Image (spheres, grey):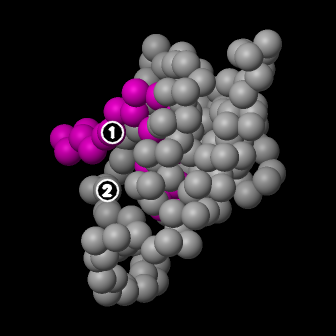
Amino acid sequence: MANQNYRIFPNKVELFKFFGAYAPQLNAAVSARLPLNGLCVGTQHKAFRNTVEFFTALAEMSGLDVDAQHSTIRMGSYIVFFNKDIPSPNSMGKVVDAKIVEVQDKKDDKENLSIDLILEEAMSLNDEADKKGSKDRLVEFALSKGVTLTKNKSFEKMIADLKSELEAF
């Protein structure tokens, strides 16, 4: 292997984000929560007996030339070897619609209203008697809106994180 092309992914989330850019049918959010050597395509869960089968499946889905024999998992990090240079996701022959978008200084009132409604619904999940349950419900609610929250913060700070993520969209 004179020319070694590889990428190191510190965790499953980063691995599936990368391959998800090349394989839109890969459900990265669900795949990251599955056991070792498991992934989710659409709504179908798939499990593989070993890492060679796992990396072969990722290669077939993404169209990348992954060296499945040498790719490995070490101490929670994924080391993926490639037989060729890694092309950018847009150069894989996929059709990309380019649109010119005008940047506006102010967001539409409708958008602000929808964020306010989402935040109001999120605030209604707070139950002082069941703080852990409240955080769990808020995390699930945020996931349904496409936002990932961590539960190691107070409920109010989690709401603030949700608001900033929603405004970033």
Q: Is residue 34 left or right of residue 32?
A: right
- Between residue 136 and residue 38, name the one nearer to us: 136
Say what amino acid the circle numbered 2 marks. Ile
- Between residue 82 and residue 104, name the one nearer to us: 104
Say what amino acid the circle numbered 1 marks. Arg
Q: Is residue 5 left or right of residue 137?
A: left
Residue 98: quarter of image: bottom left
Residue 125: quarter of image: top right
| Numbered tag placed on residue 7 in the rendering | 1
Q: Is residue 40 left or right of residue 163?
A: right
Q: Which residue is mark 2?
A: 86
90 relative to 95, above or below? above
Q: Which residues are magenta?
A: 1-23
Are discs 1 and 2 less than 8 Å apart at CB?
A: yes
19 part of magenta stretch:
yes
138 relative to 118, above or below? above
Asked whether the viewer can see residue 88, the reply is: yes
Residue 21 drawn at (x, y percent): 47, 59
- Between residue 70 and residue 114, name the one nearer to us: 114
Residue 146 drawn at (x, y percent): 60, 51
Q: Residue at x 78, y 44 (%)?
A: 45
Q: Secondary structure at mark 2?
A: loop
Asked whether the viewer can see residue 34, the reply is: no
Q: Is residue 119 left or right of residue 12?
A: right
